[in-house]
Image (cartoon, rainbow, N blue to C red):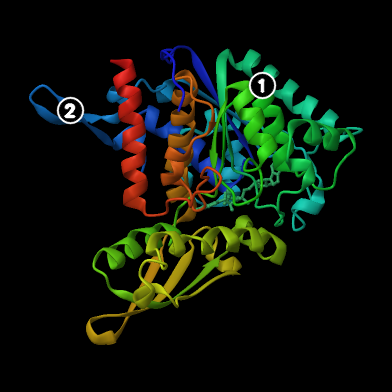
Amino acid sequence: MSQSRLVPPSGRLGVLLPGMGAVATTTIAGVMLARRGLGLPVGSLTQMGTLPLRRANGAEEVPLKEAVPLAGLHQLAFGGWDLFPDDALASATNAEVLSEKHLGLVAEELRAVKPMPAVFYPEFVRRLHGTHVKSAPSKAHMVEQVREDVRRFLRDEGCDRAVAVWCGSTEVYREASAVHQTIERFEDGLRHDSPEISNSQIYAWALLQEGVPMANGSPALTLDFPAMYELARERGVPIAGKDFKTGQTLMKTIVAPGLKTRMLGLRGWYSTNILGNRDGEVLDDPDSFRSKEVSKLGVLESILHAGEHPALYGNVAHKVRIDYYPPRGDQKEGWDNIDLFGWLNYPMQMKINFLCRDSILAAPIVLDLALLLDLAKRAGMSGMQDWLGFYFKAPMSPAGTLPVHDLFAQHSRLHDALRRIAREEA
Ligand SMILES: NC(=O)c1ccc[n+]([C@@H]2O[C@H](COP(=O)([O-])OP(=O)(O)OC[C@H]3O[C@@H](n4cnc5c(N)ncnc54)[C@H](O)[C@@H]3O)[C@@H](O)[C@H]2O)c1
């Protein structure tokens, strides 16, 4: 990681959220409540966590926001884009994550956050029919429009800088193709409306060109291809992804390292979910689900190291299902059936029934990513930030290396990176 002297977090920080649905509005409302002392930002490491630092008289747990210079919640200004013109209050009300009472306390502030018209080529999200969309003669012109949006937002909100976290719907599964290999090919693709270039990639290209760090909360191909890495390095912008690690996968990356640490064997892990929000509706399209499935399936392999322990993990059946079930709304329910074995191969089972709230688990991740990416940029770091893998289901990792999925190993890496920044600051 390349570092230079840290720039202090002065002035206002714009937090741009492409996709202002359940996760984005739960984040925005939560920050508005927390900064007025009306709610606790539970689950956020930057707000509630500590960093162990070595001091003359031994190790000391220092509140994370004192150990490294982060922007404060009062300095944040929110903006974003969506296919629908609803302001953040209307969108949060539709999402039915936070109570009317909570939303009522910050209603005026939320009403003032209005989405900018979206970049929307509908073939990438087939279940939604947006009305609040841009039109442009080519994808290259779309990039220019988003860049102009960013500059206008910064001017209007009096911000010196911004960060972005993709909170938009999951796009259909695509692999990187020729157009994604270099900056020149990607720009040529933009000019010629390459069908391989998605909505989220258009935002990402524009944001990086404007020097705005970006994280990808969805499992789609948005930031993780060679042309984007090259652009991030060239523009000195940190990027991170992908797919917020919230419900079932969070639990999987907590339980699996435990089984592995005790050298207990695994025969199979069957995971199923019901989900009834708009995200669930989008994932009902098999091609969008494919993006999610790929992101969820990679997890066990890297935790268990089957190659080193074939007798324990050489033959694991791993299945993941998501069913769209409207009555459940944002209150997802996940079931895991884990077939494990112990001493002399005797079989055992474990069942996990997690009744979680998706956006309640995702919101602190969005906040932390925004503040940590801003910190990284001010510390002179650019390109892929794999130390932020803690927050993701499918963490980015340098070519030729396996991503780390074990939550505790990820947590150590996050702390190591923050300690390096803290030392630089000292
Ligand atoms: N909630 C979680 O726990 C969780 C976990 C991991 C990943 N995610 C991902 O986070 C994203 C957001 O989840 P959510 O529950 O808020 O979904 P949501 O459906 O409530 O919100 C997504 C929003 O994105 C908008 N959108 C779609 N395409 C867009 C475009 N091109 N430009 C601008 N806006 C666009 C939609 O109109 C919608 O309002 C999804 O990709 C989801 O898979 C969520």
In the image, what residue type sits under mark 1? Glu
Quarter of the rendering containing residue 416: top left
Quarter of the rendering containing residue 173: bottom right
Instruction: Please tell me which of labels 2 and 1 falls first in the chain.
Output: 2
Q: Relative to 176, say whether 71 is above or below.
A: above
In this image, 138 relative to 312: left or right? Answer: right
Q: Which mark is residue 210?
A: 1
In this image, 257 relative to 330: left or right? Answer: left
In this image, 129 relative to 312: left or right? Answer: right
Label 2 Cα neighbours within 10 Å, binned few <14 / some 14-19 / many ≥20: few
Q: Nearer the viewer, mark 2 or mark 1?
A: 2
Q: In which quadrant will I find the C terminus? A: top left
Which of these two is toward me, 215 or 128? 215
Which secondary structure, mark 1? loop
In this image, 172 relative to 417: left or right? Answer: right
Q: Residue at x 85, y 43 (%)?
A: 194
Which of these two is toward me, 206 or 53? 53
Percent position of residue 347, x then y: 31, 86
C-alpha gap between disc 2 and disc 1 = 38 Å
Percent position of residue 165, x then y: 57, 36
Q: In which quadrant will I find the N terminus? A: top left
Q: In this figure, which residue is indicated by the disc labeled 2?
A: 54
Q: Residue at x 59, y 63 (%)?
A: 293
Q: Is residue 316 visible?
A: yes
Q: Relative to 154, say whether 247 is above or below.
A: below
In the image, what residue type sits under mark 2? Arg
Q: Residue at x 68, y 17 (%)?
A: 151
